[in-house]
Image (tube, rainbow, N blue to C red):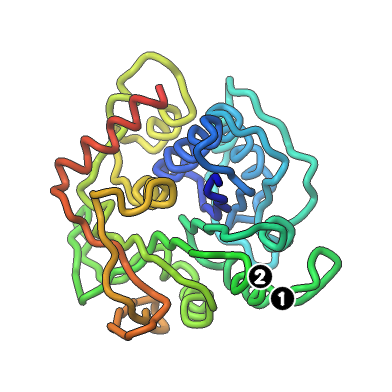
Amino acid sequence: MRKQIFIDTDMGSDCDDVAAVAILAHFHRLGKINILGVSHTSANPRTVEYLDMVCRFYGCETESLAAASAEWGIGEFREGFFDDVLKGFAFRTPSCRLNAVQLMRKQLSAAKDATVLCIGPLNNMSRFLDSQPDKISSLSGKEILSQNVKEVVVMGGIFNDKRYDFYGEVFDVEYNIKLDASASKKFIENCPTEITFVEFELGYNVKTFADTVAAEKETPIRRAYQLFRVCERESWDIVAALYCIFGENGHYRASEEGKCVVEENGKTHFYKQQGGLHRYLIETESKETIVRYVRELEHELS
């Protein structure tokens, strides 16, 4: 049976989300996985066109796309961004009129052993967790997660009190978690199913997609990286996507079971706990080997 994956992304001016969604769409086209749907953490209505364009280009045409509601959506886009990123590519505005949480309820209530991939802030996930029975499903969001979702993969977190110097800024709180820290805390500490964290460390210094950017063929990935003004980029969301498709796959192993606790500012702590629902991925190979692994898949997309 193909792995059933629902994607929640903040795909926008940064570019690794585009590569991650493209990889998933590619393996959907090959019949290796099934994309149940894709939601966006921003309420901007044009984000759905952007999702449609990337999924369509890489082989996954679907109506199951939605953005967050204006009530809780997060994400700003510079003026003209969507015109720049969509120009020359085929896209449409899907007919689905559900918001992100409604789409999650619809698709996941009908799923079995699904995986939810979160490559953005957890504003949608927190509200999905809190959602109550309605016309879409007789189950609450918590019940859907407990009964129908096998694993939630969160690209986020910094554990073991690590600190990073990233482009001149030293920090110990990861962006996706802190962007809506209250939502992150609520979801992570109350989700009834297993959560695997792909923390900041795994994509740090794994810079990829330079070959795609240097190529002459215009693609959504190349356009996104050029607009972000980089010739290569760290691979946080890409690593999370690849884990969803291939599992630990010899490049990573899971930590011991435990519990992630989130501070009010988004700082994360991991405590070992037998029977705990949380774990995080640990590299078992060098950064150089992992870069080669990602680049092999990069060339498969070209």
C-alpha span from label 1 to label 2 = 6 Å
Across and down, in percent, residue 64 comes to 70, 46
Report the front residue among 110 and 219: 110
71 relative to 263, above or below: above
Q: Residue furthest front?
A: 1
Report the front residue among 46 and 157: 157
Across and down, in percent, residue 182 comes to 50, 79
Report the residue at 57% width, 41% height from top.
79
Across and down, in percent, residue 245 comes to 43, 46
**Which residue position is annotated with label 1?**
140
What is the three-letter code of the residue carrying label 1? Ser
Answer with left or right where residue 235 lies relative to residue 241: left
211 relative to 23, above or below: above
Dot 2 crowding, Cα within 10 Å, few <14, some 14–19, many 20+: many
- Tag shown at residue 144: 2
Report the residue at 42% width, 33% height from top.
227
What is the three-letter code of the residue carrying label 2? Ile
252 relative to 170, above or below: above
Callout 2: helix, strand or loop? Answer: helix
Say whether marks 1 and 2 touch (CB < 8 Å): yes
Answer with left or right where residue 41 lies relative to residue 260: right
